[in-house]
Image: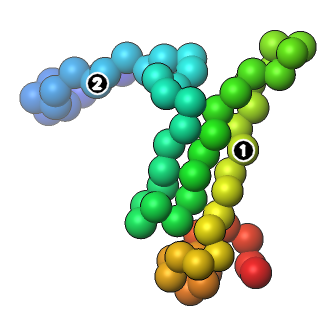
Amino acid sequence: MVFRWQLWLSPRPQRTETPAEGQMFGPEDSIKFDYTYHDDGRFVVKETHYANSEAVRAGRSGPPL
């Protein structure tokens, strides 16, 4: 339900079921997300956290090292 005061908001873009590209980088290029499908049709996201990134070393990205 939308309240009258919320009608000024711009329309939101439609979300897709899958990303437009096969990979995406996170903030400060410290994370890379790879998107793919398995042979059985499952959608898979693989995260790579780069240890040489200051954000990762400072603990602002990914699991503790």
Mark positioned earlier in the residue sequence (2 or 1): 2
Image-based side of 21 in relation to 32, left or right: left
Amino acid tagged 2: Arg
- Above or below — where is 54 with respect to 3? below
Residue 4 visible in the picture: no
Image-based side of 31 in relation to 37, left or right: left
Residue 8 visible in the picture: yes
Q: Residue at x 48, y 55 (%)?
A: 26
Q: Are marks 2 and 1 in contact (CB under 8 Å)?
A: no
Amino acid tagged 1: Lys
- Above or below — where is 61 with respect to 32? below
**Percent x, y of residue 27:** 43, 61
**How far apart are labels 2 and 1 at the CA level?**
27 Å
Q: Which residue is mark 1?
A: 46
Badge 1 marks a residue whose secondary structure is strand
Q: Which residue is mark 2?
A: 12
- Above or below — where is 16 with respect to 61? above
